[in-house]
Amino acid sequence: MISVILPVFNAGDYLKDSIESILNQTEKDIELIVVNDGSTDNSEEVILSFGDERIRYVKFEENKGVAAAFNEGLKLANGDFITFHGADDLSLPHRFERLLAEFCCENIGYVHSDMLLITDHDIPFSYWQAGNISPDDIYSFFLNVGTPFNNGSILFRREAVEGIHFNETIKVGSDTDFVLKVAKGKWRSFHVPEPLYIYRRHQSNLTKQRSYDELAGHIRINIKEEDLISLPEVQGIKGEKRLLKAKLIAGLALARRWMRREGFLLFYEAIPLVKTERDRHFFEGMKGLVEKNYKHAVHHFQQITDRDHIEENYLGEAFLHMKNYKEAYRRFWKALQLSPNYHSPVKNLKIIGILRGFNLIDKHADHFK
């Protein structure tokens, strides 16, 4: 059985369609746990209008937040599989059946799909493409990109979420924090490259309305030192040099996103760890990348004569920014020779290919251009 957890807060305008998309699934063995998070609109009326015995209804007398609603649903869930659903989102009719079919191995802990993004007027405006990410690369992806998978698009095996809860102190991003906790475990994911989940973006759920501190909350709790030194690329580096490189790598990743304050803070925290001339050149090289002074970055990375895989990779990134594709390619290749399982240069080789000429095998979209 699949337990579908649906938090609701003043979603009356979209709730009927959302619930119908769940109840009308081709996979019928489900329970729908609806948690009314203190709604003041007609949400309760919509919920009670359904006479389906698969619905279990819980009502909070006051608004506690989506994380508390998710946790309440987790406590009540009886299913072998669990998914979370937005009250204004939609699931394609065969979504659950399609995701269930991919739990072919015991180590698959969660299966997820792509999403189509629509406006409050049902106008498609974007496509969210996910992918398979190994447990070892999850944290690096989180730092560089953000949410590895959208929470609503995932179907979890029950065992994969046992003992894991949503952090109710995080105002924005508790779902990202939850997914990251699951993804850091032993479980592997499987990606279905189809838009099985329809995510509705409208004025009341736009994250741009949130403050920087609200948006940064789930980032801050995941950049502790024990998290940073777990980065795959710094494994095997001993002592303070490991933490130095981890802080600078994470700082660069966050600064390249919208988290410049947190990125610069990690650089500041790394200063006391700079002990040797080699440390100084690496620090200055990474600083050049953050400040987009790529000649400065190249100069300092090249002062390191016996560069390791990390130094070669970031020297390559500096060349890539300068559109010196040949030298960038050579540096990424060298990084992989030094550390064959290092993922960043593989990603960067892909970027070179995309920048130089991207060939998409699936040409269906070309017919509609």
Image (cartoon, helix red, strand yellow):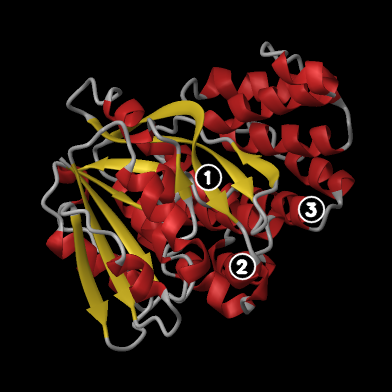
Mark earlier in primary sequence (3, 2): 2
Mark earlier in primary sequence (1, 3): 1
Q: Type of residue at label 2?
A: Thr
Residue 228 in view? no
Picture residue at 64% right of the left edge, 38% below the top: 311
Q: Type of residue at label 3?
A: Gly
Picture residue at 47% right of the left edge, 69% below the top: 11
Secondary structure found at label 1: strand
**Position above or below: 266 against 331:** below
**Position above or below: 283 against 107:** below
Per the image, the residue denoted by label 1 is: 198
- Answer with left or right where residue 172 lies relative to residue 248: left
Task: Give the camera-side residue of 77 and 26.
Answer: 26
Per the image, the residue denoted by label 2 is: 207
Picture residue at 32% right of the left edge, 66% below the top: 47
Residue 288's disc is 3
- Answer with left or right where residue 333 lies relative to residue 75: right
